[in-house]
Image: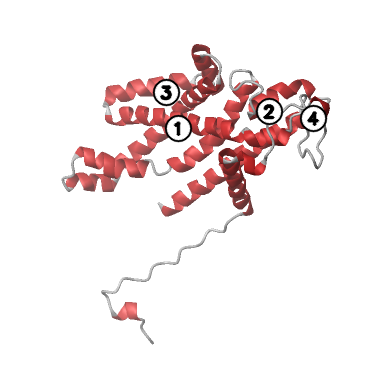
Amino acid sequence: MTLDAATIDPLRPPPRPERRRRRVRVGEVVAVLFTVALVIASVAPGLLAPLDPTAVAPLEAFRPPSPSHPFGTDESGRDVYTRLVHGTGASLLIGLAATAIGLGTALVLALVAVFGGRVADGIVGRTIEVLFAFPALLSALLVILVLGPGPVAATVAVGLSTAPGYARIIRTSLLTVRASGYVESARLLGHSPARVVLRTILPNALAPLLALATLGVGQAVVWASSLSFLGLGAQPPAPEWGAMLASARVYLTTAWWLTVFPGLLIVATTLAATAIGRSLDARSRRSS
């Protein structure tokens, strides 16, 4: 019978178990590639669509998809593909800004609830419950009623309407981490309350927020496009996806491409954000 080195030398640590490598799925690769294309379209749309998105050509109106116009043309002869590419930056910017507003507001509410005492926790909790009683889209409409229509108002409205859901998740995460053993150990070691919060509780409680924010961007893009479709966000002739759907809905039976391609792009963006968000969430759960 032979003994290995780990058995002979008790001071030698046992070998670490091999980590199972997670197989990369085809859907995740497609989602990442599509997201990269969206980022390029946002930063440098001229690389993908060199034409002018506002150029009017009445003689080219209502051209179906063809090699010269892959997504066809609209009622003014403008190239739909070019307008979709140049509208990517506006749609993604609204989604990112709205998600940042929602997460920032939620973080403030959650911190007040967790570290502000029982009274503050009760007030924040009741406020979140009241906000949850209203549908998110209705809350966004109420905000726009106060601020007035426009892309900035739509961004703020979507961000504030998503804040209650984020606040509940962040509050639960903060309470879970605060009650953990390593936080109690940091307190027993004499660390100040501020250091415990900033160096121990917040980094561990907010780690899953990256996946949550990625999922929120796709949701915010859909809501912002919905508000633009209702005429409360970006206004035509701005090349924004929701505004393009709004102006094309009257031609649904005669020019199907005017609504199909913007709708497919909104759906594809949401699916890509969801796939990446779930992948990040799965990786964070395995590493924790």
Q: Residue at x 29, y 74 (%)?
A: 12
In the image, which is nearer the foreground, mark 4 or mark 3? 4
Q: CA distance from mark 4 to mark 1?
A: 35 Å
Q: Earlier in the sequence, mark 4 or mark 3?
A: 3
| 107 relative position to 28: left or right | left
In the image, which is nearer the foreground, mark 1 or mark 2? 2
Q: CA distance from mark 4 to mark 3?
A: 42 Å
Q: Earlier in the sequence, mark 3 or mark 2?
A: 2
- Along the line of sight, the residue nearer the viewer: 10 or 29: 29
Q: CA distance from mark 3 to mark 2?
A: 43 Å
Say what secondary structure mark 2 lies in.
Answer: loop
Q: Residue at x 64, y 26 (%)?
A: 242
The image quarter in which residue 88 lies: top right
Q: Which residue is mark 1?
A: 100
Q: Which residue is mark 2?
A: 54
- Along the line of sight, the residue nearer the viewer: 249 or 132: 249
Say what secondary structure mark 1 lies in.
Answer: helix
Residue 270 badge? none
Residue 213 picture location, percent across and down: 48, 38
Q: Which residue is mark 4?
A: 256
* Residue 288, above or below 7: above
Q: CA distance from mark 1 to mark 2?
A: 30 Å
Q: Earlier in the sequence, mark 4 or mark 1?
A: 1
Say what secondary structure mark 4 lies in.
Answer: loop
